[in-house]
Image (tube, helix red, strand yellow):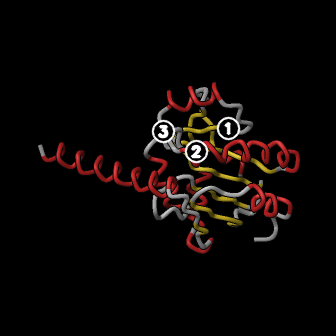
Amino acid sequence: MRRGKLNAVILGAAALAVLAGVYAGVAGRRERIPATTISPEAIAQLFETRLDDSTGKSRHLVQWRGQTLVVNFWATWCEPCRDEMPALSRLNERFSPNGVNFIGIALDTPSNVAQFAKKMAISYPLLIAGPEGIELSQALGNKHSALPYTVVLGPRGDVLLTRLGRVSEAELTTILQDPARP
């Protein structure tokens, strides 16, 4: 019986985190998180992660180590997340020839992401982390557990940008044109 109560408390806390994320997204909150709040261990944790993509194929994030990487945490139910995806897709097409990679990490179910991927033409991999992705986004500086949340890592694993809320296409363009500049 105690285990059931503990599970209920955990599910309640997760629901509150999701609601906070929805509120932050709906309110249009944009916040630049100081890059110094992300530890080298958190970046190592990211690259040690293995997630399924929207087709069910397992992807090991270490494949993107040593390259500029834009990591966008999102969900199908998050309107600001969906709104920024076409811009992220355009930037992926523009900068991928220069060794810049984009990945979307969904805090959602595999079926929701697969349906979304069929409807939307997204040019970068959509990976599925489910609720466990909240912990990963928190380790990468998302203290509010809100969506969307974007982290840009340089080729050496240095943090170039963290953004809570919609990231602007112009801001990402500036950073990706010169990824050596934090």
Q: Secondary structure at mark 1?
A: loop
Q: Secondary structure at mark 2?
A: strand
The residue positioned 69% from the left and 59% from the top of the image is 152
Can you say whether 21 is above or below 39 in the image? above
Sequence-wise, the earlier of marks 2 and 1 is 2
Can you tell which quarter of the image residue 51 is in?
Answer: top right
Label 2, label 1: how far apart the Cα atoms are? 9 Å
Give the left or right position of residue 8, taking residue 24 as reference.
left
Q: Which residue is mark 1?
A: 125
Quarter of the rendering occupied by the N terminus: top left
Q: Residue at x 47, y 41 (%)?
A: 130
Task: Please report the residue visible at 41 percent of the width from the left and 50 percent of the height from the top.
Answer: 18
| Label 1 to label 3: alpha-carbon separation | 15 Å
Tell me the distance, in whole angstroms, between the alpha carbons under discs 2 and 3. Answer: 9 Å
Q: Position of residue 7 (x, y in %)?
A: 24, 45
Mark 1 touches mark 3? (CB < 8 Å): no
User: Which is more toward the observer, 135 or 79?
Assistant: 79
Q: Which of the labelled discs sits on residue 105, or is there none?
A: 2
Say what secondary structure mark 3 lies in: loop
Three-letter amino acid code at the position of disc 3: Asp
Q: Quadrant of the C terminus?
A: bottom right
The three-letter code of the residue at mark 1 reads: Pro
Whether 130 is drawn above or below 98: the answer is: above
Residue type, label 2: Ile
Q: How many marks?
A: 3
Q: Nearer the viewer, residue 61 or 170?
A: 170
Please tell me which residue is depicted at 48% across the width and 56% down the height of the picture.
146
Q: Residues within 10 Å of mark 2 (few under 14, many from 20)?
A: many
Q: Which residue is mark 3?
A: 108
